Amino acid sequence: MKKILVLPCGDALSHVSRALEVAKGLRALRHEVIFASDGDHMRLPREEGFRVLPLKLVDPRVLASKLHEGRMDWYDDATVAEHVAAELELMEKVKPDLVLSDFRLTAGISAELAGVPYASILNASWTNYCSVHSRTPEHKVPQNRRDRD
């Protein structure tokens, strides 16, 4: 039996639900699965009987503001350092055999520093292996009606 530490972005249903389905499969194979994250959707692993530890996310207000501006730079140096430190502390406490993340962008850094194998769940459309090619619109989301005119 292996111990798997699952680190999804707990504010997004897609990230939690994908990780949860993988976790259920791992549990069925008799692995110990522990989740760590905060956010509204972390109730789902709890409801399925998984242990859930707290782990701070990017401030949802910062994330929403940046996304509203069409930006994806919500991790500054201080946030990266804070998240890596918290993840390393968590890994030292939990001692996982594997870290599995879904959109916890610092988890790979922390796992490498801790010497723990790492796997990531991601959208196929974010890879070169996607057979359907789509283009993300390159426009700012309007803040109000005046911005659209």
Image (cartoon, helix red, strand yellow):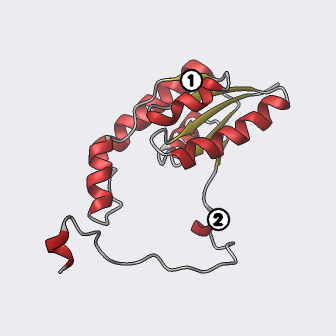
Q: Is residue 24 above or below residue 134?
A: above
Residue 76 shows in the view: no
Query: What x and y, as percent, mark residue 93?
Result: 56, 18
Q: Residues within 10 Å of mark 1 (few under 14, many from 20)?
A: many
At horizontal 61% and vertical 43% (from top left) the residue drawn is 17
Is tag 1's residue or tag 2's residue first in the polypeptide sequence?
A: 1
Quarter of the image where the C terminus is located: bottom left
Q: Secondary structure at mark 2?
A: helix
Q: Which mark is residue 149?
A: none
- The residue beneath circle 1 is 52
- Residue that lies at the very extreme toward the right in this rendered image: 29
Give the residue drawn at x 83%, y 26%: 30
61 to the left or right of 34? left
Whether residue 94 is visible: yes
Q: Residues within 10 Å of mark 2 (few under 14, many from 20)?
A: few
Which residue is located at x 33 percent, y 59 percent?
A: 67
In the rendered view, would you say 90 is above or below 13? above
The quadrant where residue 94 appears: top right
The part of the image, by quadrant, that contains residue 147 is bottom left
Q: Which type of secondary structure does the marked residue at label 1 adopt?
A: strand
* Along the viewing direction, whichever of 111 and 5 lies nearer the viewer: 5
Q: Residue at x 47, y 24 (%)?
A: 54
Mark 2 — residue? 124
Q: Nearer the viewer, residue 108 or 15?
A: 15
Farthest-out residue, left: 146
- Mark 2 belongs to which amino acid? Ala
Which image quadrant: the N terminus?
top right
Image location of residue 4, percent across then percent down: 69, 31
The amino acid at mark 1 is Val
Cα distance between the residues tagged 1 and 2: 27 Å
Q: Is residue 109 left or right of residue 81?
A: right
Q: Report x, y in % for residue 141.
A: 29, 69
